[in-house]
Image (cartoon, rainbow, N blue to C red):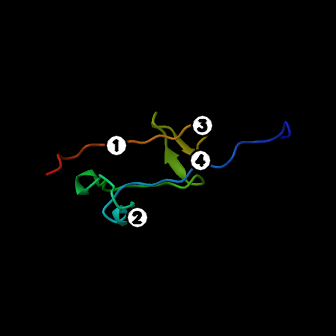
Amino acid sequence: MSSGATGGGGGSGYVYTAESASNYPSGCLLDARYYLANTQLIAGNLTITNPDDSVSTGHIGNGYIKIYKIQEAA
């Protein structure tokens, strides 16, 4: 490996929603109580709001996630 090598691209994103549930393998223990709603995956070349509320295009380092509980599952 050359000394000028750089890191690879980011990983994929995935969220568990009513629409994506059918992609899970059989035997998955998650059910509708665990669906996420109003989800957003943002491409690295688009503007994002960072955890400190600053704005940037793309991101260097570890990713992050914000989850807000808006109601108790029935």
In the picture of the structure, the residue carrying the numbered disc 4 is 58
Q: Which quadrant: the N terminus?
A: top right
Q: Residue at x 35, y 66 (%)?
A: 22
Please indicate whether residue 39 sits to the left or right of residue 56 in the image: left
Give coordinates of residue 7: x percent, y percent: 71, 42
Q: Secondary structure at mark 1?
A: loop
In the picture of the structure, the residue carrying the numbered disc 2 is 23
Cβ–Cβ under 8 Å for marks 1 and 3: no
In the picture of the structure, the residue carrying the numbered disc 3 is 61
Are there few (<14), some (14-19), or many (20+) residues within 10 Å of tag 2? few
Q: State the separation of the CA atoms marked 1 and 3.
A: 20 Å
Are there few (<14), some (14-19), or many (20+) residues within 10 Å of tag 1? few
Earlier residue among tags 3 and 2: 2
Are there few (<14), some (14-19), or many (20+) residues within 10 Å of tag 3? few
* Of the two numbered discs 4 and 2 in the rendering, the one whose residue sits closer to the viewer: 2
Cβ–Cβ under 8 Å for marks 3 and 2: no
The residue type indicated by label 1 comes to: Ile
Please indicate whether residue 60 sits to the left or right of residue 51 in the image: right
In the picture of the structure, the residue carrying the numbered disc 1 is 67
Q: Residue at x 37, y 63 (%)?
A: 20
Earlier residue among tags 1 and 2: 2
Q: State the separation of the CA atoms marked 4 and 2.
A: 28 Å
